[in-house]
Image (cartoon, rainbow, N blue to C red):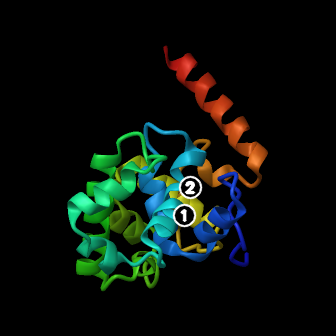
Amino acid sequence: MPKPASLPWTEQEDANRLLAEDPLALMLGMMLDQQFPMERAFLGPFLLRERLGRDLDAADIAGIDPDALAEVFRGPPAIHRFPGSMAKRAQALCAFVVERYEGDVARIWTDADATEVLKRLQELPGYGKEKSRIFVAILGKRMGIRPAGWEKQAADWPSIADVATWDDIFVLREKKRLAKGAKK
């Protein structure tokens, strides 16, 4: 499976292209996907790049004054429902990528089997087991990155990894709503 030109997860095609082209953008979008609409979370990296006025770079983001980065996240519009805490989390994620992977986020999934990739993802600030399993599913289902054993480590429930078209977001949202209702 070739790498896609775009991931149709926002209403802005430039943002969708950024998600497919820039591994850090994809990683940050996934981090922002909590307590916030999916399509807004995945727009976040595009807004961050636009506001910074330059390409996303882990070392650059890690080195920004925390108060200045929080202002960037506040907008308007806000990059996330919780701009201050998410600015801190994004900065921590970027600092971790710089420290552990020399700023190259793609090293998390290169030269490793899926068990190791999942372990590496779970070490990231803002990534727990479920988010990490969803990210493994994104790598395999959307990005064509399929380390050995990825299917066993990937999320086995409906997630953003199953969104192949813009309309799929609404289908996914309904599935999540129904699943949540069934749990009650």
Q: Identity of the amino acid at label 1?
A: Phe
User: Quick one: SS at disc 2?
Assistant: loop
Residue type at mark 2: give it.
Leu
The quarter of the picture where residue 72 lies is bottom left
Quarter of the picture holding the N terminus: bottom right
How many numbered marks have been drawn onto this rendered protein structure?
2
The answer to whether any part of residue 124 appears in the image is no
Horizontal and vertical percent position of residue 27: 46, 64
Q: Nearer the viewer, residue 56 or 117?
A: 56
Q: Is 105 left or right of 94, judged from the image as shown?
A: right
Q: Pointer 2: what residue? A: 43
**What residue did someone put label 1 on?**
46
Q: Residue at x 74, y 44 (%)?
A: 168
Which residue sits furthest front? 76
Q: Secondary structure at mark 1?
A: helix
Residue closest to the eye, 4 or 56: 56
**Image mark for residue 145:** none
Q: Residues within 10 Å of mark 1 (few under 14, many from 20)?
A: many
Where residue 98 sits: x, y (%)?
Answer: 28, 79
Q: Position of residue 33 (x, y in %)?
A: 47, 47
173 is higher (above) or lower (below) than 180: below
Left or right of 169 in this view: 156: left
Residue plotted at (63% across, 23% down)? 178
36 is higher (above) or lower (below) than 183: below
> Label 2 vs label 1: CA separation?
5 Å
The residue under the point 51% across, 73% down is: 23
